[in-house]
Amino acid sequence: MISRQKIWIPRFAVAIGILVLLYLFPLFRVVSLDDANEASAKASAAKFDPIVFVDQFWNDKLLASKANAVDALALVNEIQANPGKVRQARGRQVGLSQSYFLTVTGVGRVVSVEKNSVGLAITDQSDEAEVVLESGILFGNTVRDGTGLLDVNEFQNTQDFNAISTELNRRIEADVLPTLRDIATSGTEIEFSGCAQVSDESTDLNPLRVVPFFVEAK
C-alpha cells in the first residue's frame, strides 16, 4: 500500500506540473473578434497605397523634374546629326535592359492628330512630326523609369513598384491626356514634358515617342 502511494505521489506531481505549464504557456491563444479586427485594420493601414504615393510623387518630384529634362530642340538636332550618340550623351539605362530612357521638355507645333497620338514639329523648318505625344491608353513603365527618381530597391516588393507604374499611367490618362486632346489642333504650339523609351534607335528616335506628364497650350 505504501509503495503504491510512493508511485502515485510523483505521478500526481508531474500531472500538476504539466497543468501549470499549460496554463502559463497555452498551445493556442484565443483572440477576441475585436482584437482580430483591430489587428487586421492595422495591417491594412500599413499596406502600400500607390494612389497616395503617386499623388505626393507627382506634386513634389515629377513636375519638378522638368527643370532637369533634356531640351527637345537640342535633342532633335542631336538625333538628326548623330543618333548613335544619343544613348551615351542623354540616355538612362535601367538594369541590364538594352532599352534606354529620355526625359524631355520643350515646345512643338502640332502637325498631325491621330486617334492615339499627337505629332509635333520641333524645329522651325519642319512640317513633319519629330516628337509624337502618346494620347491613348498607356502601358509599361516609361514614366516610372524615365526620370530616374524611383529606385526599386527602396520598396518592399516589386508588386508595390509595379503598382506605381499602373497609377502613374492612370493619372496621366485622367489628368493630362484629356487636356492634350482638347488643345491638339493643327498649328497650335504645345509646351510639354514627358518620358520616352528607346528600344530600337532606327524606329524610336525619329519620331521620338513621348509619354507626357505635362502639357499646356502656348
Image (cartoon, helix red, strand yellow):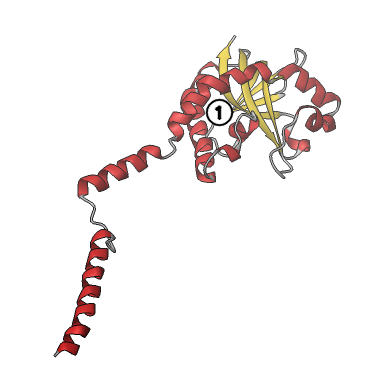
The quadrant of the image that shows the N terminus is: bottom left
Residue marked by disc 1: 135
Query: Residue visible at 86% across and 24% down?
Result: 81
Q: Residue furthest right?
A: 81
Q: How many numbered circles does the render carry?
A: 1
Q: Residue at x 48, y 24 (%)?
A: 56
Query: At which x and y percent is residue 39?
Result: 30, 44
Residue 177 in view here: no
108 or 212, which lies in front? 212
Left or right: residue 201 compared with residue 8: right
Return the residue nearer the eye: 148 or 87. 148
Residue 150 can be seen, yes or no: yes
In-image side of 6 versus 153 (left or right): left
Where's residue 127, x and y in %? 73, 18
Instruction: Tell me the kind of residue under disc 1.
Output: Ser
Camera-side residue: 35 or 81?
35
Residue 157: give x, y in percent of width and height.
52, 45
